[in-house]
């Protein structure tokens, strides 16, 4: 079994309900166990700032799938829950964005997948929820909590639990 860290984001529709469905689908389709799930956070838009705030979260799963097979599952889940990558603008509004942040200690660079995620330590919207579930995880030689300490978390707020 491998430990995979996945970031979830979205700002169109009932994002928190979409996250619940996405996690259920990922675990079912990847025959994975959910190890940890962060709180949901509201975050300012990144890249293309002329849009609604996002909601972001992270999960850790254990799976027997290899990284490319897990990526395939994640892309199928995005499609199933309304994402059409070909029709959206880069960093624009979306129902669901799933990013594989890390897969064990695998270092990989292929046309469709780079591990660990190449922009992880620039993105507070990923680091804040990730630090909640894996503060001491070392990714690419950097401890998550140390990476979080090096970025601004301005505008990021933890949302109350949905119950």
Image (spheres, rainbow, N blue to C red):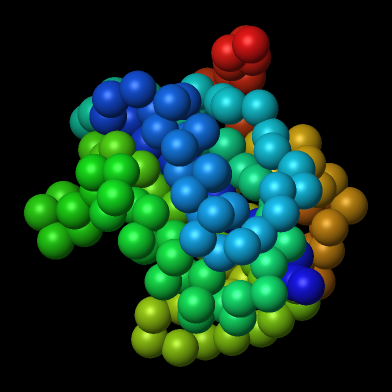
Which residue is at a point 63% across and 19% down the rendered structure image? 158
Point 50% across, 60% down: residue:
29
How many labels sit on residues? 0
Horizontally, residue 133 falls left or right of residue 93, namely right
Could you tell whether 11 is left or right of 40 in the image?
left
Q: Quadrant of the N terminus?
A: bottom right
Q: Residue 129 location, x and y as percent?
A: 66, 37
Q: Quadrant of residue 86?
A: bottom left
Where residue 4 appears, x then y in whole percent?
68, 63
x and y, in percent, of residue 80 in the image: 29, 50
Residue 152 in sight here? no
Residue in the picture at 51% in, 33% down: 20
Q: Residue furthest right?
A: 136
Q: Quadrant of the C terminus?
A: top right
Residue extending farthest left: 87
- Answer above or below: position of 38 versus 142: above
Instruction: Let me know if residue 62 appears in the view.
Output: yes
Residue visible at 77% across and 36% down? 132
Q: Position of residue 14 (x, y in %)?
A: 35, 22
Against 104, residue 11 (above or below) is above
Q: Quadrant of residue 9?
A: top left
Task: Give the vertical position of 123 relative to 85 (above or below).
Answer: above
């Amino acid at each position: 079994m491998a430990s995979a860290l996945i970031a979830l984001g979205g700002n169109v529709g009932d994002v928190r309900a979409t996250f619940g469905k996405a996690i259920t689908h990922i675990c079912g389709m990847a025959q994975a166990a959910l190890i940890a799930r962060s709180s949901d956070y509201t975050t300012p838009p990144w890249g293309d700032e002329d849009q609604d705030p996002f909601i972001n979260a992270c999960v850790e799963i254990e799976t027997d799938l290899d990284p490319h097979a897990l990526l395939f599952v994640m892309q199928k889940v995005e499609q199933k829950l309304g994402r059409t990558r070909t029709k959206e603008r880069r960093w624009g509004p979306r129902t669901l964005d799933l990013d594989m942040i890390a897969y064990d200690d695998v270092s990989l660079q292929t046309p469709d997948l780079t591990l660990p995620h190449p922009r992880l330590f620039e993105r507070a919207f990923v680091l804040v929820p990730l630090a909640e579930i894996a503060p001491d995880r070392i990714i690419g030689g950097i401890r998550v909590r140390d990476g979080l300490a090096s970025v601004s978390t301005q505008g990021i707020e933890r949302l109350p639990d949905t119950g």
